[in-house]
Structures are given as C-alpha cells and as structure tokens.
Amino acid sequence: MNHPTGYDDAELGELLGAYALDAVDADEAEAVERYVARVPDAAVEVDQLRTAAAWLGATEALSPPPELRDAVLGAVREQMRNDEPISAYLTETARFDVLVDEIPRDCLGLRTANGLTIHELVIHLAAMESLLAMTLGSPTEADLEQPDIEARTAELIQRYHDRPVDDARAVWRRSVEAVRRWAAAPENAHAEVACYDLFFTRDNLLLARSFETWTHSDDIRRALHRPARRPEPRALNRMAGMSVTTLPIALEVTGRAHRGKSARIVLTGSGGGTWLVPLGRGEAAAPADIVLTADIVDWCLVVAERLSPDALPHEAQGDRSLVPHLVEAASVFATL
Amino acid sequence: MAEDGRDLQASNWEPTIRARLVAGDEDALGEACDQFASFVYGIAFRVIGDARAAEDVAQDVFMKLWEQPTGFEPRRGSLRTWLGTLAHRRAVDCVRREEAKRRTAVRDATRSAVAPDVEEMAMALVTSERVRSALDALPEEQRVAIQLAYFGGRTYREVAQVLGIPEGTAKSRLRLGLRRIAVALERTEQWA
C-alpha cells in the first residue's frame, strides 16, 4: 500500500527499530506514527521496541544533582500559584481523560443533560477543543474548518460515531495539547482570542474551557448515576469569578442592565468569594443595591444551564426585584 | 505491600501514581522523581554529555508528567518506558539542535549508581544487567548501530554514513538488534 508520505508499509515496518530509537527525522516519525495508528501489529511491536530502548537507558542510571527534585516541585508550585487558569485547565482535562477510560463501553449510548449521548458528548468536546486549537493556529483534525460549533459537532459525530470512543478522544487530546502549548508560550500571556463567537483573554479562555470540561464531565457522571465532582477550590473560585465579572456585559446584551446600580455577589462553600459588580456599563459603587448569597456550585450550575435560574437557592438583601435579572443573565455566555 | 502502602509491583503502583497526578497531588510527583530521576537524568546525560542540559531535560520530562499525566497510558507500557522515551527524545532533540557539540568530554566523570527506591531499583538493576548482557550478546554490527543511534543520538542515515553501510542495512540492524533485546527482556519479565 502506497501513501502520500511516499513510504509503503514494508518500508515503514523496516523503520520501526529506528523510530523506537528516535533515529528518524520528523517526517519519517510522522509517517511511522500514522502507520502504527492503523496497523495494530505494528503498534505492539513499537511498544515492545520502545520498552527495550528505555531499558537501554536504564543501564545508564546516574544520580542527578540533588536540587533536581526541588527544582521540579518548585516549578510546579510556581505554576499553581502564578497560573491558576492553566492549572485548572490541566486538572479538568486530565480528569475528563481518566473519566473516558472509566465509562463502561455499553453505556456510551446513554443520554446526557444536553440531549447528546455520552459518546456524542465526548465528540462534542473534541469539536470544541479542536475548534480552539484551529483558531490558535494548530489544526488537529484534517479537512475540518467549520467554525460553527453545532455544525462542527454534527460533522465530527458523522466521522466518529461508528468508531471507538478513543478515536474521538485522540482528537480531543491532540487539541488539548495544542491549547496547552499555546497557553504556555510567554508571548500569549496577554493575548486576546476570538472563538465560539466571543472574545476571551488568555486566562478567561482557559477558565471557560475548564468550566465546560468540568460541566460535561459531570453530565457524564450523572448519566452513569455517579456522584458529581467539584473542581479544586481555587479553580472553582476563578471559574465562578469569571462568570460574575462578565455579568455587566451579560446584563447589557440581554437588555436587563440597570446602569448606576451594583450588586454584591457572595458565593459560599469551598472556593467561595465576594464580588462587587455594576449592573451594566460603568463602575460599581458601594454600597450595593442588592446582596445575593448562594452556594458557589449552585451558581455555577445556573451559569452552565444545568439548574434553572428560578431554582437557585439563595438569600437576597436589598432590592430583591433585581435578583431574577441577575440570575437569568448569568448563563448568557453558556456555550454548552 | 511496602510500608508506605505502595505496592511493590510497578503494575499496581503506576496507575495509582497516575490517578494521584491527575488529582493534582504534588507528593505523587515527588515520588515519581524519587523513583525515576536517576533513570531520566542518566539517559539525558549519556546522550547530551552535559550536566546542565541533562538537568533541564530531566526537569522538562517531570513537568510533562505533571502537566499531562494521562499521556502515560499503562496499557501501552510502563511509566519507566514512557519517561525513558520522553527523556531520550528530548535529549536527542537537544543534541540535534546543538549539532556537533562535544559529546564525549564530561561522560563518566560524575557517574555513581544511587537509587532511591530499593525494591524498584533492585529489580531495575537486575533487568539492566540483563539488558547489558543482551546488548553485549548482540552481533557486533547490531550493537554498534544501536549504540550510535541510542546513546549517540544519530539518525539511521548518520549511522549508515558512519559505518559505511547502506541505509537499508542500518535500518534493519537497528530493528533486529532492538528486537533481540526486547525478547531477552520479555524472558526476564516472565521470570520476575
């Protein structure tokens, strides 16, 4: 069988040893990876050869400088402290990845909250993440440029519905890696990105993706009758904070703005916090006209349209007539 | 079970470490460092021949494990293989970027065989010994080709050039030689 890469299967087979030893160039490595992805026997051989190669390395074990461990853990702490958005993104995507492994294969057809089956929901996340990767300049799925997320999801469902869920996850994984690489580049620290018909700062983009990944992970857990899982408190705080600080714009675009008025939103529970926001364009002025107190996870469920605004358990002090406007505007940017 | 609750068998320990890393547990990364830092650093140092660059590669490898613990898939191989593959690839990239740098000078200078996890490393030492014997037992032409590629960071084309053999011959020497080591290793695992 001949391929556009210019290598036939026999040649690719001959390259497996060199590939496992990283002794091929980038084009050859890519050709071998495609070959291995479609020929299970070759995949088994590569895994064996890679194991052997790694053991060759083990013959060279050498004590590293004692500061290596501290340097690694220091870098991790630095990242967690200084870059919560990327930490949240990495944690939520890793949890989703593990969750896909845990889905019993005969449950993939179960319906989730937004009407898609579990399998289709994994594909939907592949559509979301691959659209972002493409927007960031690293397309991860061939011949797919559709920017409309519903149409993109439908097209990917066509492609992946009859294939193992791992294939859709592979698209999603490649995309997550592309997003991670982009986010890690210092020059993108203050980048603004237009995607999903919205404008995002780099941090809000990562938080929005973390939020959706968490929401859909819980959709899958609910469909499987498993308990929901909260994000880490700091991540939850940042995600909820993003939804609260975009309230003024949400109120404006939905015609519910009350310019000159402000609200104090108090979200309780682990990761909770307090935010003072204007109820439309302009600056927030204390004292607030309304103080709304609710559980942080309940608030996030409303933002994600998993809880109806009028079902949000809350306490309000001040001008209570503002409450429905506030809560209904909270989910305007849900793209779920 | 070991005293710290960790299973001695890598096959049980590894998925646990992976799950803890996914949950964002820093201590799990510390344990992975304790377990594999010598291995990862050793590969990087052997290929690059520069302590500073080897340290950077090792740090990079463990950061990757932290950032993407799900990149390691237990059903496709051990954590050792995953880390070793990554370390080697990064080291080779480094060498190829800085083409023609001195690769020999510093080697062997600071070598010592210290290992933090007794059981794992005892097993590792036995296996390394077998791999070393398997490497020694290879026909010389295969052994030299593998050493040039793996430790020298050369492509098979460069291996062919250095040895004055056709590229096809270099490819098959690498594949056949590595296969023999893989077979020797499988036997070791069966015995273990």
Image (cartoon, rainbow, N blue to C red):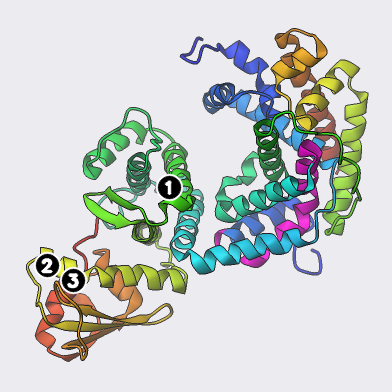
Of helix, strand and loop, which one carries label 2? helix
Q: Earlier in the sequence, mark 1 or mark 3?
A: 1
Say which amino acid is labelled 2: Glu
Q: Are marks 1 and 2 in contact (CB under 8 Å)?
A: no
Q: Is residue B1 above or below residue B192?
A: below
Query: As drawn, is A68 to the left or to the right of B106?
Result: left
Of helix, strand and loop, which one carries label 1? helix
Name the residue beneath numbered marker 1. Answer: A179
- Number of residue marks: 3
Say which amino acid is labelled 1: Val
Residue occupying image coordinates x 18% and y 87%: A290
In this view, the residue in front, A19 or B129, is A19
Q: Position of residue B189 (x, y in %)?
A: 82, 40
Task: Tell me which corner region of the image, top left, top right, bottom left or bottom right, holds residue A305.
Answer: bottom left
Name the residue beneath numbered marker 2. Answer: A252
Residue occupying image coordinates x 26% and y 67%: A303
Q: Residues within 10 Å of mark 1 (few under 14, many from 20)?
A: many
Say which amino acid is labelled 3: Pro
Which numbered tag is attached to residue A167? none
Q: Earlier in the sequence, mark 1 or mark 2?
A: 1
Range covered by the magenta-colored residues: B22-49
In this view, the residue in front, A159 or A227, is A159
Residue A230, visible in the rendered structure: no
Q: Position of residue B154 (x, y in %)?
A: 73, 25
Residue occupying image coordinates x 28% and y 41%: A153
Q: Label 3 to label 2, Cα distance in Å?
A: 6 Å
Name the residue beneath numbered marker 3. Answer: A248
Q: Are marks 3 and 2 in contact (CB under 8 Å)?
A: yes
